[in-house]
Amino acid sequence: DAGVIQSPRHEVTEMGQEVTLRCKPISGHDYLFWYRQTMMRGLELLIYFNNNVPIDDSGMPEDRFSAKMPNASFSTLKIQPSEPRDSAVYFCASTNRGATRGTGELFFGEGSRLTVL
Amino acid sequence: GDSVTQMEGPVTLSEEAFLTINCTYTATGYPSLFWYVQYPGEGLQLLLKATKADDKGSNKGFEATYRKETTSFHLEKGSVQVSDSAVYFCALSEWNTGNQFYFGTGTSLTVIP
């Protein structure tokens, strides 16, 4: 089975540009999470969805960040406008509690490394 | 609220040394506990898990026992290899309380030949 697929793997952009990161969760998974990882702040939860509905977006840093999940197989994380401090690795993860016998362990993608100049 | 605390890194060991990475947790209910590993340039991968008290999770020579009395889930390996160099994250999930996943801050391990 294919794992969580993220694109792009690497993105370099200039400050002020719009950035869109994409995620395809594992088929059948009903939870999707977006995390950000930096050396300074470690792994931070940005937002998570259940059945395509955003449940908790309290980790979204500010209004420049938005996330959508239009269907069960696709999610986007958008930053507009981007700033140098947004440089990080962004991970998408998914799970299905039923498929994991209730434990709900997360399956991570390879990440999208964003550099904002 | 729920939380996970793991030992500060970085940890540097010689090949074949014994490894322990401490992890303690705070939870309101009965969480499942996990160790994830992140190799350089990759995403996090599940290393092992335990779902109830006294369960022992094991994988690739790593072990961790769910200790409810001490709220701990320490990661151990008897003889580390250079290929074990990675960042290790302790985590818990407590879905029954309506919330989700909590990660520790990660512990970087470097194994030198």
Image: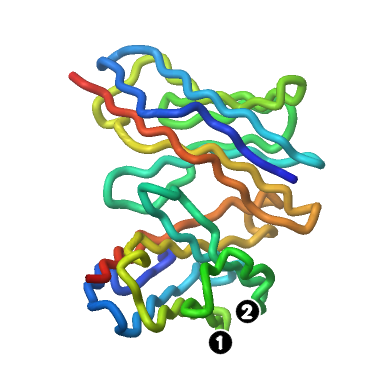
Could you tell me which residue is drawn at 41 percent across and 55 percent down? Answer: A37
Label 2 with label 1: CB-CB less than 8 Å: yes
The residues tagged by marks 2 and 1 sit, at their Cα atoms, a distance apart of 7 Å
Which residue is outermost to the bottom? A70
* Residue A1, visible in the rendered structure: no
Could you tell me which residue is drawn at 42 percent across and 24 percent down? Answer: B61
User: At label 1, which amino acid type do we have?
Assistant: Pro
Query: Is residue A107 placed above or below A84 in the rendered structure?
Result: above
Label ID, residue A70: 1
Q: Secondary structure at mark 2?
A: loop
Left or right of B35 in this view: A20: left
User: At label 2, which amino acid type do we have?
Assistant: Asn
Give the chain of mark 2: A
Viewer-side residue, B90 vs A25 = B90
Point out residue A6 in the picture as x, y percentages from the top left corner. 37, 70
Could you tell me which residue is drawn at 54 percent across and 40 percent down? Answer: B104
Left or right of A56 in this view: A74: left
Mark 1 closeness class: few <14, some 14–19, many ≥20 residues within 10 Å: few
Query: Is residue B88 placed above or below A105 in the rendered structure?
Result: above
Q: Quadrant of residue A91?
A: bottom left
**Tags 2 and 1 both on a single chain:** yes
Q: Earlier in the sequence, mark 2 or mark 1?
A: 2
Q: Secondary structure at mark 1?
A: strand
Give the chain of mark 1: A
Left or right of B52 in this view: A78: left
The residue that mark 2 highlights is: A52
Could you tell me which residue is drawn at 41 percent across and 61 percent down? Answer: A109
